[in-house]
Amino acid sequence: MASAPYARRALASTALLVASTVMGPAAALSGTERETSRGRNVILLVGDGMGDSEITLARNYTVGAGGRLHMDSFPMTGAYTTYSVDSDGRPNYVTDSAASATAWATGHKTVNDRISKTGDTDRAVPTILELARQDGLATGSVTTAELTDATPAALTSHVTDRSCQGPADMERCPTDTRAAGGTGSIAEQTISHHVDVLLGGGKQRFDQTITQGPGRGTTVLERARQQGYRVVMDVRSLDSVRPGRPVLGLFAPEELPVAWTGKPATVGGTTSQRCVTDRNHSDGIPSLEALTRKAIALLDARARQKSAGKGFFLQVEGASIDKQNHDADPCGQIGETVAFDQAVKAAREYAAEHPDTLVITTADHGHSSQIVPMAAKPAGLSATLVTDEGAPMKVSYATHAGEEGQEHSGVQVRIAAEGPEAHRVLGTTDQTQLFTTLRIALNLQ
């Protein structure tokens, strides 16, 4: 149950939430809001494709139907809507990760596949990470996907299409090329911001050669080193990093390997199975929890180096909950949800020692998995798992019958928080309002 002070703050915020717009940029902060925010740091954790079904699957399988995950015990819990728009501003009821990340990163709705640019005029709009850096805060982004994938890209770049990840990938972004006067690919833009901590996958994008503008003839990775980044590629190198220089961690050519494996869902269903949970970490690839703990430690120290009065902003993405859902792989997605929950634990442990830290956990959109009765005969794909409680659980995937894999769903998703301004997630809000919450908590103009 929420405490009395939190409850009073929640009631007082209702008018603000109702009055705020969900179709455009968030309003400028009032002086009162900036003065009363007690926040110094924000840790935003995004489970890609982690709707209520995905959370329930992970809970049932691991801690049991009556148990609770770390993400289940936040004091403030609400829901937010996730729709994107078309170029005329009409709702597109099922978003992709690019448009949804743009919504919370900038406060603007946009069209699917676009990264931090408007849906109608294709105009770049500032992101929360850019605003935080301009104000002197330390900044970081951690993901199990490529650092150029949609969610991290929405913080550090502005492109017409999410596919434009490296200099060789610009076919769908002709106006964003350096030759056309644009800012280049996602990878090029990402390193240009001098973000203090960048940890994830996607080395293949940074190995591409810059063909236009500054750094022409060098790879993006070489350009990053020239700009002062310390580049690390395994656990040992990451452990040795100390605050000071910005760090770029690239731990896989593409996304990081999943934590758990098992038999994907099939037509007619699989035989009962237990997930394989003992992935060998000797490959030098850190877990999401380890990445999160290291990022927090580096950003905490970096913020103190930069200014005693400023904090940090960190985004952490558990990306392959979504990717394994697309593949109808219940063990893969459950393992990634559990790994994400461990990152949530790490963030909450830091916040317990630093009460000026706002921790938010949410998803960017819903996805395809559903828990159905054991007697059900799903029209699509299904799999049966035996949970840690020893009970059978049938999982159905039926959002797409083609070869491309399962689809997102358009449902509202959970958003939960603790710390300064946590009451702003209560009720039913929209993704664009998360941008306002982040900005207020960080005392940004």
Image: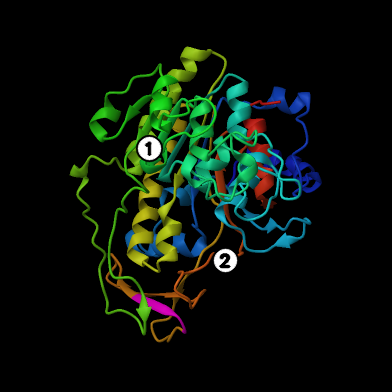
Q: Taking 444 as reference, is 66 above or below it?
A: below
Q: Main secondary structure of the magenta part?
A: strand
Which image quadrant is residue 181 in? top right
Which image quadrant is residue 302 in? top left
Looking at the rendered image, the disc whose residue lies closer to the viewer, 2 or 1, is 1
Which image quadrant is residue 118 in? top right
- Dot 1: element: loop
Characterize the local packing of mark 2: few (<14), some (14-19) or many (20 or more) Cα atoms within 10 angstroms. many
Which residue corresponds to mark 2? Answer: 409
Residue at left 43%, top 81%? 373
Inter-mark Cα distance, 2 to 1: 34 Å
Q: What segment is highlighted magenta in the picture?
A: 379-383
Q: Taking 79 as reference, is 12 above or below it?
A: above
**Residue 155: which disc?**
none
Q: Can residue 184 be found in the magenta stretch?
A: no
Type of amino acid at the residue the image marks with label 1 = Asp
- The residue lying toward the viewer, choosing from 44 and 48, is 48
Horizontal side of residue 309 vs 327, given as left or right: right
Residue at left 42%, top 35%? 209
Q: Position of residue 101 (x, y in %)?
A: 58, 47
Horizontal side of residue 386 vs 4, given as left or right: left
Type of amino acid at the residue the image marks with label 2 = Ser
Q: Can residue 380 be found in the magenta stretch?
A: yes
Which residue corresponds to mark 1? Answer: 207
Horizontal side of residue 77 vs 19, given as left or right: left
> Is residue 66 shown to the viewer in this render?
no
